[in-house]
Image (spheres, rainbow, N blue to C red):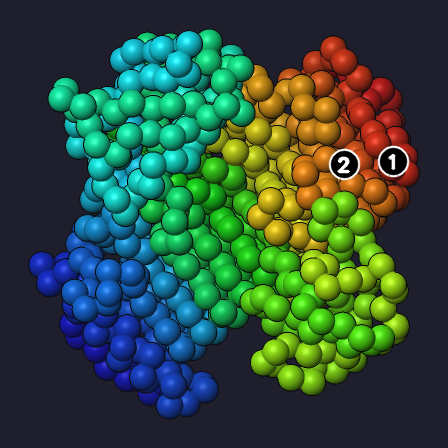
């Protein structure tokens, strides 16, 4: 590595392609972070040489750490427009960026030498026993890998010719499976009772994929500010391709999550392309492409805290996530999904246990055990624009954030909804109700593609706005507010193109519906205004 400090306060390092397993790159990161820590005006640029850089895990990290760590850094750029980082251990996280500010990854390709999922063929189906036999394809892990596979989870039916989701069928099945192979290398898979009504859709000769769902990601951004991924491509990840946890102002510009062209792999990341858990400012996602994931495209939310004690204006809170003076807290009865109160934090008295004073007396309906969502830490000000979501298992955008926009995007051939503006109580993801959101100029095609997702009473729509209680039924109230759907072009596959529930001041303007059938708009307990575009009806073909 050649490095030096210039007169302008810029440190530059160049990392050649080598067989050292990433040692030179780690050393360059260490030097760059040390250089910038001395003076707040210093910057550092690490340039990766053209070619494939094989990255091995550290031998002494307890088998859980990321292969590359950028920690407590500021103003550091890792650039490699012609470089690929190829990670050799499918059980490990690739890159972690933690407690850092103004870190940039520019032009780098990330991939794994071995996949962290399995794919193969269904060779026999026993519908009466709700079972089938699965044979993993050569070169892929199997269910005997105890790190990747735990004996239960979900899998997806595939067209074995190209690996895409099987058309005109239920595409996702909850399963249990043997973790030891039979004499011929196959594994017995049992479909869970919840999905057995769809057993007829599983046929011998179908492809099948089972992915890993853990906490090891392609790129993790942890408790950081203004991290930018620019022209980064991710071909595989053990869980989410990009996870941002308690991080603000994350920027994704021209990022691609997709299978490598020419690869025989049927999925890219095992979970979401972009998964954001809490932050004071939402992400900016522009010009991106998300394809092949085994779960959603983008998910924006904050996790719930829990009330463990209370008095008139005092709350004792349990759970992770920052709470500061001036924050707006939403208190929710989780079983019913009722919003009990929204209060502002006047003072944070203690951190262990978390003791906060709020600006008004708490209503009698607030009790120990209530869920608390910090709306001020729920990624406000997000923007998703000019991006393409296509050909994956899941929902295009799963949104709980407010004060943002989804504009000029294309959603195509997704198993679930194109856009889901709703809380997820089973995962304690909220808050309840998105506010001041603009959804404009988007195109939705062939979604939901999963046949079993087109007739749910409360989610049979391409664009879905709803509130849920703890049992995934409709919750009371109108927590969504001021959501504008404008100039969107929707192919209606589900019972409705647009569903609006639990919302006030929703406007739908200039919507184009390419297919009729049932009513294009369904509503529940909502205040909604429909404004046709000049010169055409909402359902113009």
Residue 159 % position (x, y): 37, 16
How far across and down, in percent of the image, does residue 199 sit?
46, 13
**Residue lying farthest bottom?**
38
Q: For marks 1 and 2, give the one nearer the viewer.
A: 2
Q: Give the residue at x 16% y 65%.
A: 59
The local secondary structure at tag 2 comes to loop
Residue 99 image-quadrant placement:
bottom left
Judge the density around disc 1: few (<14), some (14-19), many (≥20) Cα neighbours within 10 Å. some
Q: Nearer the viewer, residue 53 or 306?
A: 306
- Callout 1–callout 2 Cβ contact below 8 Å: yes
In the visual, does 435 lie left or right of 191?
right
Q: What percent of the width, then of the height, locates residue 361? A: 88, 72
Mark 2 Cα-neighbour bin, 10 Å: few <14, some 14–19, many ≥20: some
Depicted 413 relative to depicted 241: above or below:
above
Q: Which residue lies under the disc numbered 1? A: 525
Pointer 2 residue:
474
Which label is found at residue 3? none
């Amino acid at each position: 590595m050649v490095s030096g400090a210039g007169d302008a306060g810029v440190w530059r390092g160049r990392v050649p392609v080598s067989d050292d397993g990433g040692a030179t790159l780690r050393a360059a990161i260490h030097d760059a972070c040390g250089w910038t820590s001395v003076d707040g005006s210093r910057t550092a640029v690490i340039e990766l040489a053209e070619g494939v850089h094989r990255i091995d895990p550290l031998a002494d990290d307890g088998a859980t750490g990321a292969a590359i760590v950028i920690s407590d850094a500021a103003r550091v750029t890792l650039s490699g427009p012609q470089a690929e980082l190829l990670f050799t251990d499918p059980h490990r996280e690739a890159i972690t960026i933690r407690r850092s500010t103004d870190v940039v990854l520019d032009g780098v390709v990330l991939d794994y030498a071995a996949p962290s999922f399995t794919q193969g063929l269904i060779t026999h189906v026993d519908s009466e026993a709700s079972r089938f036999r699965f044979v993993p394809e050569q070169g892929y892990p199997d269910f005997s890998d105890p790190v990747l596979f735990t004996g239960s989870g979900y899998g997806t039916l595939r067209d074995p010719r190209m690996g895409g989701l099987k058309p005109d069928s239920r595409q996702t099945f909850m399963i249990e499976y043997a973790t030891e192979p039979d004499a011929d290398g196959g594994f017995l898979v049992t479909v869970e009772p919840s999905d057995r009504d769809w057993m007829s859709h599983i046929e011998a000769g179908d492809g099948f994929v089972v992915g890993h769902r853990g906490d090891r990601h392609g790129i993790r951004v942890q408790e950081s500010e203004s991290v930018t991924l620019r022209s980064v491509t991710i071909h595989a990840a053990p869980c989410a391709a990009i996870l941002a946890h308690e991080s603000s102002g994350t920027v994704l510009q021209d990022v691609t999550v997709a299978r490598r062209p020419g690869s025989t792999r049927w999925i890219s990341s095992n979970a979401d392309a972009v998964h954001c858990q809490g932050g004071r400012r939402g992400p900016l996602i522009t010009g991106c492409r998300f394809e092949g994931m085994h779960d959603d495209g983008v998910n924006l939310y904050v996790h719930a805290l829990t009330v463990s004690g209370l008095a008139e204006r005092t709350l004792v809170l349990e759970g992770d996530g920052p709470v500061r003076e001036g924050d707006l807290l939403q208190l929710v009865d989780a079983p019913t999904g009722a919003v009990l109160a929204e209060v502002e934090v006047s003072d944070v008295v203690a951190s262990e246990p978390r003791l906060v004073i709020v600006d008004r007396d708490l209503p009698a309906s607030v009790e120990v055990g209530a869920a608390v969502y910090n709306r001020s830490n729920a990624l406000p000000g997000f923007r998703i624009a000019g991006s393409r979501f296509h050909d994956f298992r899941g929902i295009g955008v799963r949104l709980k954030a407010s004060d943002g926009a989804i504009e000029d995007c294309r959603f195509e051939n997704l198993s679930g909804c194109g856009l889901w503006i709703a809380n997820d109580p089973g995962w304690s993801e909220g808050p309840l109700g998105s506010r001041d959101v603009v959804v404009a100029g988007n195109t939705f095609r062939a979604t939901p593609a999963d046949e079993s997702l087109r007739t749910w009473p409360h989610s049979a729509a391409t664009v879905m706005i709803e509130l849920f209680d703890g049992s995934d039924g409709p919750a009371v109230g109108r927590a969504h507010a001021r959501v504008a759907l404008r100039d969107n072009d929707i192919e209606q596959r589900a019972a409705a193109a647009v569903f609006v529930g639990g919302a006030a001041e929703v406007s739908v303007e200039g919507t184009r519906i390419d297919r009729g059938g049932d009513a294009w708009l369904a509503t529940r307990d909502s205040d909604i205004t429909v404004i046709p575009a000049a010169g055409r009806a909402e359902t113009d073909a």
